[in-house]
Image (cartoon, grey):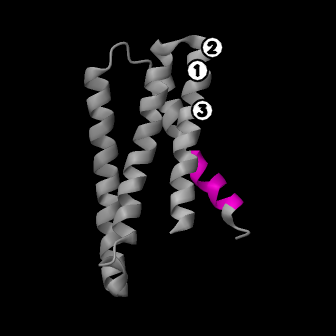
Amino acid sequence: MRTVRNILLAQLLTGLVLAAIVWIWLGSERAVPTLIGGLIGVVPNAFLAARLMSPRAASSAQSLLRAGWIGEAGKLAIAAVMFAAVFVTLKPLHPEFLFAGYIATILALPVGLLFDRGR
């Protein structure tokens, strides 16, 4: 449980720090898509984590597998809906910053696992 929380926090902090750096250097017009991209990376992962960590999922191996499948499908659907909403509503879009924020938060997951390995 602690590892999952730490990874989600690392992803969130990665998105926030990257958005802050972009805001300082390039202004809010590019920082907003960076932050939103980071949130698109974190929110679906939090949904997946919630599905896998639910008490019902831990009741049996079959329940855990079902929770994993539902969680992963939900994660993809949430990310797709969030991306679609951003592409429709955010003007100016600056997709390079949107995807930079998203990719940075996704890359924070394996880095967070590397740092948590010793525990």
* Disc on res. 64: none
Residue under circle 1? Answer: 22
Callout 2 crowding tier (Cα within 10 Å): few <14, some 14–19, many ≥20: few
Does 80 sit above or below residue 5? above
Secondary structure of the residue carrying tag 1 is helix
Real-space Cα separation, disc 3 to disc 2, in angstroms: 12 Å
Q: Quadrant of residue 113?
A: bottom right
Please provide percent x and percent y for residue 72.
Answer: 35, 60
Mark closer to the chain start, 1 or 3: 3
Of the image marks 3 and 2, the number of the one nearer the N terminus: 3
**What is the number of the mark on residue 17?**
3
Residue in the foreground of this view, choosing between 29 and 85 = 29
The amino acid pointed to by label 1 is Val
**Any magenta on residue 112?**
yes
Question: Residue 24 vs residue 101: left or right?
Answer: right
Which element carries disc 2, helix, strand or loop?
A: helix
Is the C-beta separation of discs 1 and 3 under 8 Å? no
Q: Is residue 69 magenta?
A: no
Residue 23 x, y percent position in the rendering: 56, 18
Q: Residue at x 58, y 48 (%)?
A: 10
Q: Are marks 2 and 1 in contact (CB under 8 Å)?
A: yes
x then y, percent, for residue 65: 35, 77
Alpha carbon of mark 2 to alpha carbon of mark 1: how far? 5 Å
Report the span colored magenta: 107-115
Q: What residue is pinned by disc 2? A: 25
Q: Secondary structure at mark 3?
A: helix
Q: Position of residue 104 (x, y in %)?
A: 57, 39
Which amino acid type is marked by label 2?
Trp
Q: How many labels sit on residues?
A: 3
Q: Which residue sits at x=30%, y=47%?
A: 78
Q: Rounded to the nearest whole Å, what is the CA distance between mark 1 and mark 3?
A: 9 Å
